[in-house]
Amino acid sequence: MDVFLRILATTGFMNLTWGNVAMIIVGGFAIYLAIAKNYEPLLLLPIGFGVIVGNIPYMEGLPLGVYDTVQNGFSQNSVFSLIYYGVTSGIFPPLIFLGIGALTDFSSLISNPKSVLLGAAAQMGIFITYLGALMIGFDNMEAASIGIIGGADGPTSIFLSSQLAPHLLGPIAIAAYSYMALVPVIQPPIMKLLTTVKERKIRMKPPRRVSKIEKIIFPIVVVLLAALIAPGSLTLVGMLCLGNLLKESGVTDRLAKAAGGPLLDICTILLSFAVGLSTQATTFLTFQSVGIFILGLVSFAVATFFGVLFGKLMNLFLKEKINPLIGAAGVSAVPDSARVVHHFAQHYDKDNHLLMQAMAPNVAGVIGSAIAAGVFMGIFM
């Protein structure tokens, strides 16, 4: 009986808490959204499974969790902690940016450079939420990491929080990816509130054809300008532009395919799974996490609000009007936000095709959120 009780004490059943159960349910819900609703399945599915695995209880002393290290004459990290190191050290997000750059076509932005203003306007959500986080008690580094959720860019949120507030990385990452997945739910009501039916029906000319030399020069110019404006953005913007240059140069197809294919997929799996693993109930179920989720939603909504509002403002000075809905795509949830704008406009005019026009502020938002992160790093590190 004594042996049986010892064995029983080593099982997860004996160490299971209500917090673990709650987080396992959250992980299952994320998997449900990924499979049944097709909400960011490439991200939510590994995150959800990571949440489940990360909340399976085990005996103290076993090196299983992302935070565990044991001493046996030398320091030995758990396997999961080694994977998580790729997140906390900031390795995975830049590699993901490399892959994103290799898959991104900046033609729409090059052909319509004023769309940069819409991408910049949407970043107001970041700075306003930063101020809000300060007001409710978060310090500067924590507030900056929370505010970046408004950029709707998971890798950027993870990268900045890993540098400034690693203790908040789990809830920040989960909030960022959750709201990215909920773009089709969050943005339409805001777009409807701020625009008239007439504005939603505005048609825009297709983007002009962009030459190869413009595509090659663009990532070089962007990395120079971004790094000079905010040197802290060099890691993310540099990798993004390198990936894009590999694609557009026409002489490194193998490297571009590797960056945008296997490398991107591997890093996405490991980053998403590791983020899920980090949401252990004891560290995740706190009042801070609740505050982060609320502020993250505010940040995302404010970013959408300012993007659309700035589109309306631009129309006061433009002879050739733009559809202000594309301002909502200034958040950098690529390409989901652009698709939401396109489908929303088609509810009012089925022949109004805004996808390519919305992609311009969308990719501008990716660069903008990385620069915003660089600004925070330059100030607080």
Image (cartoon, rainbow, N blue to C red):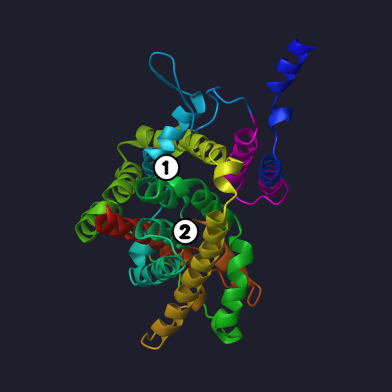
Residue 349: give x, y in percent of width and height. 63, 76
| Numbered disc 1: secondary structure | helix
Residue 209 seen anywhere in this rendered image of the structure: no
Contact? badges 2 and 1 (CB < 8 Å): no
Task: Name, please, the residue furthest toward the bottom.
Answer: 316
As displayed, is residue 193 above or below residue 56?
below
Tell me which amino acid carries mark 2.
Answer: Ile
The residue nearer to you, when weighing 21 against 45, is: 21
What residue is pinned by disc 2? 149
The overriding secondary structure of the stretch rendered in magenta is helix
Asked if residue 64 is among those painted magenta in the image, a careful observer would answer no
Q: Residue 122 has which mark?
A: none
Residue at mark 2 to residue at mark 1: CA–CA distance: 17 Å
| Numbered disc 2: secondary structure | helix
Residue 64 seen anywhere in this rendered image of the structure: yes
Q: Quadrant of residue 191?
A: bottom right
- The reply, left or right, for residue 287 in relation to residue 246 is right
Residue 273: give x, y in percent of width and height. 55, 37
- The reply, left or right, for residue 190 in relation to residue 373 is right
Residue found at x 50% / y 34%:
270
What residue is pinned by disc 1? 96
What's the magenta region?
28-57
- Count residues near mark 2 (Cα–Cα under 10 Å), then give few for <14, some for 14-19, many for 20+: many
- The reply, left or right, for residue 190 in relation to residue 121 is right
Residue 88: give x, y in percent of width and height. 40, 39
Residue 33: give x, y in percent of width and height. 69, 49
Q: Nearer the viewer, mark 2 or mark 1?
A: 2
The residue nearer to you, when weighing 251 against 364, is: 364
As displayed, is residue 23 above or below residue 105?
above
Task: Name, please, the residue furthest toward the right.
Answer: 1
The residue nearer to you, when weighing 323 against 97, is: 97
Tell me which amino acid carries mark 1.
Answer: Ile
